[in-house]
Amino acid sequence: MADSGRRPQVLVVTGMSGAGRSTAAKVLEDLGYLVIDNLPPDLIPNVLSLHEVTEQRRRLAMVIDARAGAPTGAVRRALDELDRAGVESLVLFLDAEDAVIIRRYEENRRPHPLQEGGLAEAISRERTMLAELRELTDVVIDTTELNVHQLRDRITELFAEGRRDRPMRVSVTSFGFKHGTPRDADLLFDVRFLPNPHWVPELRPLPGTADEVARYVLDHPDAQAFLERVEDLLDFLIPRYQAEGKSYLSIAIGCTGGHHRSVALSEEIGSRLAAREIAVTVRHRDVER
């Protein structure tokens, strides 16, 4: 049962069609949210009184998309009105690479909601319509590399009862630039300046989580200097993000292939954050490629 002293919570779920909005809505329902789909943004404040969210169900999720036109202005006005009413709001944006969205639509054989001509053109038009709204969001989840079960886990991790009460949750993701940069990164660091274990025959087949590779990467003076500067930066940023109401921070660490340097450094950064009692998750996007 929700604590009556807490502010009511409204989660606005938006993003690209084909990026997982429907899956996210189902997961949120399982987590106890009252979910309203395809809601015009101007109606967001009205829904609170209709469903008595302030007294009965303190967690409400509203799914909006681009079918009603570019919704940025309406969402901004609705969020301002919620804040004045003492309602806590958060915006979640689901995204994915165009090629992946195209493949999903082709597999499902369903038309894109904005499709009048080609599918790629509809996706491009929707991305343009939602570009400003994406900049307003609190949490972006890139589902390009996620299956349905992994997306469920990510939503649960972020929005299960009690999780949002933590001051800040940090996700550290290693990746390879050759496979593209993550769409959902708030901070991105390029560590290709460090010596590459790929060129050491005995280290090449090992991942960055292996002790031998980690020592090779982390023992380099430049790696230690990098880690010290990242720690200083996060010490500066995290409390300021918290002061602005940000509850989730996504950090991406990239090397060439995402196998060695980025993996070792992501693990180390995750360990240092955990030692400071910051809720942190470390993921390795490309280590198996």
Image: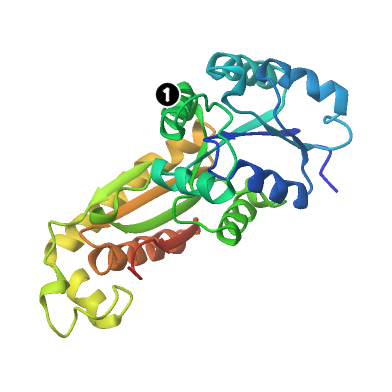
Say which of 5 and 91 sits in front: 91
Q: Quadrant of residue 22?
A: top right
Q: Residue at x 44, y 24 (%)?
A: 125
Residue 212 in the image: state x and y as whole percent. 23, 82
Q: Residue at x 82, y 45 (%)?
A: 2
Q: Is residue 127 left or right of residue 267?
A: right
Say which residue appears at 54% left-offset and 26% top-offset: 114
- Residue 199 or 262: which is nearer the viewer? 199
Expressed as whole percent of the image width and height from the top left, the position of residue 188 reads: 30, 46
Q: Is residue 214 above or below residue 166?
A: below
Image coordinates for residue 270, horizontal then vertical, percent: 40, 62
The number of callouts visible is 1
Q: Is residue 82 left or right of residue 65?
A: right
Helix, strand or loop at disc 1? helix
Whether residue 165 can be seen here: no
Residue 260 visible in the snapshot: yes
Q: How is the image coloured?
A: rainbow
Quarter of the figure with the C terminus: bottom left
Q: Is residue 259 left or right of residue 32?
A: left
| Amino acid type at image mark 1 | Thr
Percent coordinates x, y for residue 78 in the rendering: 65, 18
Q: Is residue 109 above or below residue 223?
A: above
| 180 lies above or below 57 | below
- Of residues 54 and 184, the one drawn nearer to the viewer in this rendering: 184
Q: Residues within 10 Å of mark 1 (few under 14, many from 20)?
A: few
Would you name the residue on which mark 1 appears? 128
**Which image quarter: residue 287?**
bottom left
Residue, x 17% and y 57% (percent of image)?
Answer: 225
Q: Which quadrant of the view contains residue 17?
A: top right
